[in-house]
Each structure stands twice: as structure tokens, then as C-alpha cells.
Amino acid sequence: MQYSEMSKEELLTLQAELNQQYAEAKAKGLNLDMSRGKPSATQLNVSLGLLDAINASSDLKAENGTDCRNYGVLDGIPEAKKLMADMMGTTPEHIIVYGNASLNIMYDQVSRAYTHGILGNTPWGRLDKVKFLCPVPGYDRHFAITEHFGIEMINIPMSESGPDMDMVEQYVNNDETVKGIWCVPKYSNPQGFTYSDETVKRFANLKPAAKDFRIFWDNAYVIHHLYDDKQDEILDIISECEKAGNPDMVFEFASTSKVSFPGSGIAALASSEANLADIKKSLTIQTIGYDKLNQLRHVRYFKDINGLKEHMRKHAEQMRPKFEAVLEVLNTELGGLGIGSWYAPRGGYFISFDAMEGCAKEIVAKCKEAGVKLTNAGATFPYGKDPKDSNIRIAPSFPTPEEMAQAADLFVLCVKLVSVEKLLAK
Amino acid sequence: MQYSEMSKEELLTLQAELNQQYAEAKAKGLNLDMSRGKPSATQLNVSLGLLDAINASSDLKAENGTDCRNYGVLDGIPEAKKLMADMMGTTPEHIIVYGNASLNIMYDQVSRAYTHGILGNTPWGRLDKVKFLCPVPGYDRHFAITEHFGIEMINIPMSESGPDMDMVEQYVNNDETVKGIWCVPKYSNPQGFTYSDETVKRFANLKPAAKDFRIFWDNAYVIHHLYDDKQDEILDIISECEKAGNPDMVFEFASTSKVSFPGSGIAALASSEANLADIKKSLTIQTIGYDKLNQLRHVRYFKDINGLKEHMRKHAEQMRPKFEAVLEVLNTELGGLGIGSWYAPRGGYFISFDAMEGCAKEIVAKCKEAGVKLTNAGATFPYGKDPKDSNIRIAPSFPTPEEMAQAADLFVLCVKLVSVEKLLAK
């Protein structure tokens, strides 16, 4: 029976029951963290061999003879470019391999556009107004970068096939103050949606009013499948943009943070020849080069794209039971109640839950009170403001499947309790 | 006999001899690089054990229990802070440990001052004029950063005790557009001078007209001695600034680039509590954290400051003969001729040579023509312009001592030849 169809008496009875259950749950003294997309220690063990991939006796030369122990090479050793290109579905000539974090590359791209401009265009810092489109819900750290630079962010609704492209086209093709859009195109953070072929093609065929409009294509979960048999695929944005006559329109990002070790992986940018040349003019001022030994370590360990895929299968074995534990509880406990909706992703790091309007903050607070930490409600929106106070991001990766089930039990209890309170307050 | 005292006939005879020698030298087909401060392969071998310092069987937790394989920790694991603090002569609470390069930290400090300002002051990008003082000769990559941001650079003469402090005080204490100064205070690049105690104290006691004036103190060669018995010491700028009531006036930088592996080391910033808090507000937008496994690798390998010192002794054993080979040739071949001056440094990576005015470019070109690559003449000055066309930076680290001697032989020949031409043209 849907909660909305219940009488006041039924709701009050239910509330009393739920309050009793909540008191019992609190008494358990849980201490679980579902707040960030952080691998568990067991999952990190899968990558331990990386630390043996090179040692003091190894040949430490790259395939072109570069001594990886010394200065030099701004844009990455060739075999690391190849590995990252294969992972991102593009070719090595589009790649710069950076240091340990794609977030840092994204920050630098915005910062450099702000201080020096893109391909000869006016630096954003000299313009009165710069806007970014933000498909929502999305990744809080993206929004934090654009907020940090005083860039106005505009919410764009998401569906299972990607952002609302009518709205994207309307903004990008007509408003020259719109300079960028944040995208997580595959297994999106937090919903787990993958942009459809039509969406990618519409992106590639944009006719931006601003010459320096760029798609910030954060392909963070490009090989992060949960299943062997059910995998999302996505078109290569770089070649689609080339075909559409917009070769310079995209900056694509990826890293091995959630492949090898978060913070100790390698990251890459993919873009057009003209963009890479423009970037390197600044990059050579910023650094002499990135950690080539870590690039070599990754290539020696994973060998090639097949090695990466095989490795990600091992991750999936650990992640799948956690996702399934949450989804099982959501389906069993909330199915048919009309107080929330969710999606079963085929990859990525998150499950996105939409509560009844005006309930998300209270649900997160109640979970926290009983020992389960969730991402702050609102965090998935620019400025931390979810207009409907509805979206909650669940990150199942860190706890064990058993802990995940416990945490999910508490979560659904809090969803029920807050929903009942909301209905009673009407 | 000094060249300047020679008659025209003597000079012509000498020129003919030198031209003959130069033709013979060119015929040898040398191919040597003295252009950058790059360790040799043999010297890199000294650090190979670093790659065995952690492996798949190691305990990968920091001393405070942090799993170094996972996300988290913005400012470095405690033991890495301690190691870098000891190396820099300060204490861990002043330290942020970054990624692989101090150059990148310096760039970020300038870039952030440009976009967001320092401690609430107006961002430099919004000011009509920003100036930096540049002790000369200095490090080309410093000057490249400030040039990249359109900052006007002012030459400050160097002496064996450091920059001309009368001039520094005159500018800093009276001109509020002067926002910074680039310093390599110990074994300076390229001269190998170490700032005297008086110089450091005068720096600490500056009374800047600009509240956001900062000393960019690049302590790149802080433990890079050439000798066991003759070592320069330098006062700790951080505590001197504290004592002088100017705790926020300095950003100090260092790295293990020339201790472990260039590009694969760890780097650090040292500054006041207020500056570090200000920096972290931006840093947390830029990155989730730096490579903690590499921090752990360095700490496990070097253990403590004594381990670092012992390690640097092994480097010195390799570097010393190369420096001595060059100095021997300079002394023997150019001593008393009045066509150049140099200094025998007790540490660092360079020997700085001052030719007769107007000769540096031609000397570098002649060396190149005969197969010996030197740093471009002028590179040690802002905008690549040496007003006297006199200074040449010699980097002895990469070739073997034998190659170094060969290269030095060619170098002194070119110095003689160009000097004679110069004198004849008068």
C-alpha cells in the first residue's frame, strides 16, 4: 500500500512502530560510512601486485629508451599513453598522461582557462560572466571547482539516456557566456546512467555560441563494470567531435584511481591536437614532468587493455554483492510504497536514491544519528542545494556486504520514518 | 699574460692557433650535454633501493594507521612531514607534503595568488601591476612562471652573501606592487652561493609595503653538499620570520627530486599556520590528496634525516669529481687571463661562469657547433636577457668526469677564441 493512500490513523500507527524500530537501531551503535566512493581494504588487496611490478632490479627504461628515473618527458611515456588511450577508447596521439589525479587535471583546465584563456580566447577571469551547465544530480567535486572560480552553474536535468539535450543545445548554441558542461558520461556519478549514442552525437554536433566552449567529459568509470554479461557501452566523444567538425570541443579525463590505488594511480587527459599543443605551452611552465616510474609500474603490471579488463573483473566480484545487498533491501522494503525511486546501475560506484520532496536532509540526518554516514544531502547539486531536497547518493564500496545490508536496513527505516512525518505534516 | 694586454699581432697569432685547435676539436664529433641539472644514470643507481622500500607484502599503513593505498590525507602522512621538515630545517606543523615536484607547488602558489589572492588580499590578476624581484643570475624556470602570469621582473644583483639587500629593502619596503622575490638561498642556482646569516635576517626583517608580499624560498639544494668537511649552513627562514614578527612572509619549497629520482620524488611546502590554512582551502578543491604510497616509500627508504644525509654523501662522491674536473680545467686554462671569472661551490648542481661582456651567446654557440650543449646564454636572467651577455651556467652532473673534462677543454677553448675575437673587434 502506498504511504500516500494511508489514513492519518494508519500513518500514526506506522510512525509509532517505526520510531520503536529506530530506537532499537540506534541502540546497536552502528558506525558505517557510505559517504564517499572509496574502495574497501579487501578491494585494494586486488591491486597489491602493482607494488611488485617494478623493483631495483627491473629495466627502468621505457620502450623508447627513456630512463624513467630521470627528468624529461612532459606528456607521458609512450606505453602509458597507449594504455590510457585504450582505456578511454581513443588513440595515444590524443593523450597526455599526468600525475596521480584527474581531479587535478580538471582544476588546472579551468584555472588555466581563467588565467590564460583557451586557444587564444579571452581568459575567463577577464569576462563579466562565465557559466557552466551541470547535469544534476552530479559530482560535488566538479561543482566545487567551478564555484571556486566564481562560475555560475546551471542545473540540467538527467534522464537514463543522459542530460536533457534540448536544454543543453538551447544554452550552448545561444549563450556565449556558457563555456562548459560537466559530464560523467558512463555509469554517471551518482545515478549510474550511461549517455545514449544519440546523446553523445548531439553533444558532438553542438554549435556553441562561445568559441571556447568545452565539454568536460569525466570518463571516471569507463571500465568500471559490475557485470560480465550486462555492460554499458559508450561512443568515443573524441572521434564523434572530429566527425562533426568540432575536434577541439572536448576535454576528456580518466584515471586509474579506482583501478589501482586511489591517490597513487595515473591520470590522463584526451583532447585534440590543437588543444594538447595549447595545454603543453602552459604545462611546460608548471612542471618538468610527471612520475614516469609510476607510469611504468602501471604499464608493467596491467600490460594492456585486456589486463585492465581482467583486473576490473576482480573488482566487480567485490563490488557486485555490495550493490546487490543495497538494491535487495531497497526493493524488498520500499518497493510499491511510493516514497522513493532508484535505479540499478550496471557499473560505477554509486546508487542514487530520490526520496519524496523535502525529505533528503532529514533522512541523512536520521541515518547519521544512528551511526550511518551518508553523503550530505544536496551535495550532488551545485552550491550544495538540491531544489527538491530529494536526492541521496549511496556509496556501497567501502563497507562489507554484511555491513552494507545493515546500513541499508537503517537507511530504508529512516526513509519510511521521514516520509511518514512528511505526510503527517501536510 | 692577460689577453687585454696583448698587442694586435699577439692576438692574431693566438687566434690562428685557437682556430686550429677548434677545428681539431670539432673533428672529434663530441656529443655532450651540460645544459641541465640532471643526474647521471650512475648517480641514479644510488637510489635504486627506493624501489624495494615497499612491496606487495609491506605494511602499507602510515604510523597513524592511515591506509596509504586509499583516498584521504590532503597534507601528507605524518612521517613524510617529519622527514621533509627535518630536511628543510623546520618542524612538521609548518609542512604540506605534495606530489612529485616543487616547481608545480611554486606555479600553484603564483597561480592561486593570481586567481584568489593571498590571505584575503586582492587577487594579483585584478591588479594593474605586479612585480617580482629576481636575484640574478637565477633559475630560468622561476622566471618562466612569473613571466607566464605577466608579472614584471626586476633584476637584483647577487654576491657571495646573497642578493643586494639594500636594493631588496628599497623595493620591498616602498613599492606595494612588489609582491614577491625568487630565492635559491643555499648553493644557489647557478652560482652556488649561500645566503649569509645577515642576509637571511635582513630578509626576515623586511617591512613590506604590500601585505601579500611573499619570499619564494626555493631551498632546492638544502642537503646537496659536495664535501664532508666543507659545508655551507643556512639559517631557518621560517623561524627567523617568526622572530621578526613576519611569520606569514615566506613560502619555502623543497623536494627529493635530486635526492631520490627526478620526477618520482616527493615535494613539500613550508610556511606559517595562517598561510597553510589559506592554501588548504584551495588545495581541497584541487585534489583529494597526493601519492601517499610514494611518501611512504621515501620514508621507509630514508628512515630519517641521518639516512638522507648518508644518502647525499653517496651522491657527493659522484658529483665531486665532475665539479673538480671542470674547476681544474678552468683554473689551469683560464687562470690569470682576465677573460672570465667563476666560483668553486661547496654544493648544488652548477658552476656559474662570467665571460667578458658580450661574449656569452657566442661562446655557447661555438660549444654547440663542436658538440657540447650548454644552457642557453641569457637563460639565467628574466626574459632570457642577460644585460651584459656574460653569464653561462655549467651543469656538470650528467656526463662522466672524463666527459666533463673533455667538455671543459672545449669550453675554455671557446672562451679563449671568442674573447680574442672580441678584443680584436674593439
Image (cartoon, coloured by chain):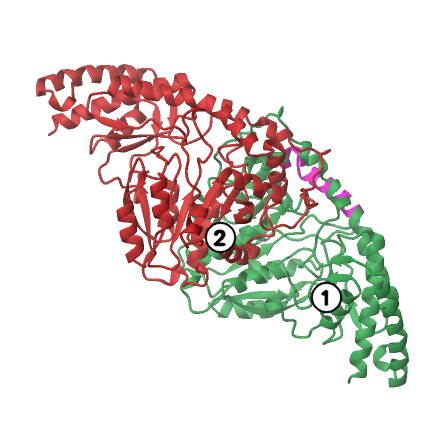
Chain colours: A green, B red
Q: Can residue A301 be found in the magenta stretch? A: yes
Quadrant in the picture for residue A379: bottom right
The kind of residue tagged 2 is: Ser
Residue A251 in view here? no
Q: Seen from this angle, which residue lies furthest front?
A: B243
In-front residue for pair A49/B210: B210
Q: Which residue is mark 1?
A: A392
Residue at 74 percent across and 67 percent down: it is A364
Q: Chain of mark 1?
A: A
Left or right: residue A200 versus residue B201 is right
Instruction: Label 1, secondary structure: give it.
Output: strand
Q: Can residue A275 be found in the magenta stretch? A: no
Local packing at callout 2 (Cα closer than 10 Å; few below 14, some 14-19, many 20+) is many
> Magenta residues, as a range?
A298-317
Name the spot of residue A189 as percent of width and height, x first.
Answer: 67, 59
- For the C terminus of chain B, the quadrant is top left
Which numbered marker is on residue B272? 2
Q: What main secondary structure does the magenta stretch of the protein show?
A: helix
The kind of residue tagged 1 is: Ile
Query: Looking at the picture, does residue A223 appear above or below residue A392?
Result: above
Left or right: residue B321 versus residue B79 is left
In-front residue for pair B25/B412: B412
- For the N terminus of chain B, the quadrant is top left
Query: Looking at the picture, does residue B253 appear above or below residue B41?
Result: below
The CA span between labels 1 and 2 is: 39 Å
In-front residue for pair A178/A124: A124
Residue at 31 percent across and 38 percent down: it is B137
Quadrant in the picture for residue B231: top left
Local packing at callout 1 (Cα closer than 10 Å; few below 14, some 14-19, many 20+) is many
In-front residue for pair A389/A278: A389
